[in-house]
Image: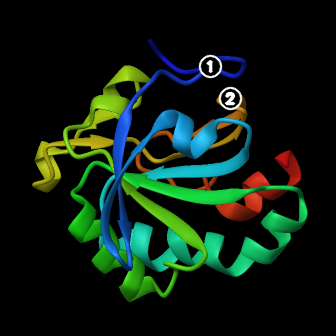
């Protein structure tokens, strides 16, 4: 499956990196009955992700929430401990839900996986953002060739 607008997200399991420690979650826990601003990154603590992607969503969080968004979620093919540490480092654990897709199961199921081996990363997620309403994708912005444009918070804002 390659995810597209109008698709219902597949069932998946995640682990949220929270201030209280790892918390198992499902697709339904995150998306059912909610409007979610969701973005995925190739790796926690990587340069673009740390310097631009997460800070953009942090800065625009009040405007995003004002558009009726219930939660802002960041996903990486990583473990929950790394996602928690990255959330603490970025100062976003109270603003952005940092979720891990440890084996890349969700990422592979939506067809947005990539081979980051040439960067020492292995299987990772492509950089993208999407708006999801009650588990259905209403907008999807997938980056091409390592760019950082269409998955940015300011690009998503008018789509809300």
> How far across and how far down the image is residue 79, in percent?
21, 57
> How far across and how far down the image is residue 85, in percent?
29, 79
Mark 2, Cα crowd under 10 Å, few <14 / some 14-19 / many 20+, is: many
Q: What element carries label 2?
A: strand
Q: Residue at x 84, y 71 (%)?
A: 63
> Mark 2 sits on what residue?
137
Which label is found at residue 8? 1
Tell me which colouring the rendered structure shows.
Answer: rainbow
Q: Is mark 1 on a helix, strand or loop?
A: loop
Q: Which residue is drawn at 63% across and 77% down?
A: 58
> How far across and how far down the image is residue 81, in percent?
22, 69
Q: In which quarter of the image is residue 45?
A: bottom left
Mark 1, Cα crowd under 10 Å, few <14 / some 14-19 / many 20+, is: some
Q: Which residue is drawn at 55% across and 34% down?
A: 28
Question: Are the residues tagged 1 and 2 within 8 Å (C-beta)?
Answer: yes
Vertical arrangement, residue 51 with respect to residue 75, above or below: below
């Amino acid at each position: 499956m390659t995810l597209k607008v109008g698709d219902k997200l597949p069932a998946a399991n995640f682990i949220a990196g929270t201030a209280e420690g790892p918390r198992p979650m499902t697709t339904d826990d995150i998306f059912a009955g909610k409007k979610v601003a969701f973005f995925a990154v190739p790796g926690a603590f990587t340069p673009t992700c740390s310097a631009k992607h997460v800070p953009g969503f942090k800065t625009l969080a009040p405007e995003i929430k004002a558009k009726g968004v219930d939660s802002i979620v960041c996903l990486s093919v990583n473990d929950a401990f790394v996602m928690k540490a990255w959330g603490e480092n970025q100062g976003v654990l109270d603003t952005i839900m940092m979720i891990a897709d440890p084996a890349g199961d969700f990422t592979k199921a939506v067809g947005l996986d990539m081979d980051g081996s040439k960067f020492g990363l292995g299987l990772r997620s492509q950089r993208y953002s999407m708006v999801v309403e009650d588990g259905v994708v209403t907008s999807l912005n997938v980056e091409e060739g390592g760019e950082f444009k269409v998955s940015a918070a300011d690009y998503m804002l008018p789509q809300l």
